[in-house]
Amino acid sequence: MFDIGFWELTLVGLIALLVLGPERLPGAIRTTAYWVRRARNVAATVRAEVERELALEETKAVLRNQVPMEELKSLEHELRRPLAPEPPKAAGENDRTA
């Protein structure tokens, strides 16, 4: 996340030990760890909510692009209608096609 190496972390620890002292350093580490954990949890929650909203928007877009139900019902009605009988052929027409 912060791309901190071993030596950078050691330097930060030594400075914290000098500034806070050995008595207050463990409490400061616990407090820092608590706030880092809370920040990560908040970030994960926000990320999950954003992903859920994006999925919902994608679903809504797909539904908007679907054929309306009225159009499907009229198409069904049209398909279920019986076919009209063929008109009689003229006397001179041949059944063969070229």
Image (tube, helix red, strand yellow):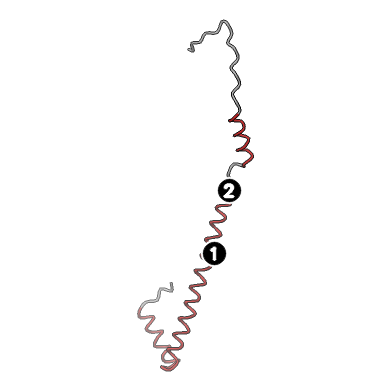
Q: In which image quadrant can residue 50 be found?
A: bottom right
- Residue labelled with disc 2: 63
Q: Secondary structure at mark 2?
A: helix
- Residue labelled with disc 1: 49
Up-down relation of residue 46 to residue 91 (above or below): below
Q: Position of residue 42 (x, y in %)?
A: 52, 72
The residue at 51%/10% (across/down) is 95
- Mark 2: give few (<14), some (14-19) or many (20+) Cα within 10 Å: few
The answer to whether residue 15 is left or right of residue 90 is left
Amino acid type, callout 2? Leu
Q: Nearer the viewer, residue 72 or 7?
A: 72
Q: Secondary structure at mark 1?
A: helix
Q: Nearer the viewer, residue 82 or 28?
A: 82
The residue at 59%/34% (across/down) is 76
- Residue reaching furthest left? 6
What mark, if any, has residue 98 been given in the picture? none
Q: How many marks?
A: 2
Q: Position of residue 65 (x, y in %)?
A: 58, 45
- Quarter of the N terminus within the rendering: bottom left
| First along the sequence among labels 1 and 2 | 1
What whole-number distance in Å separates the C-alpha atoms at marks 1 and 2?
Answer: 21 Å
Amino acid type, callout 1? Glu
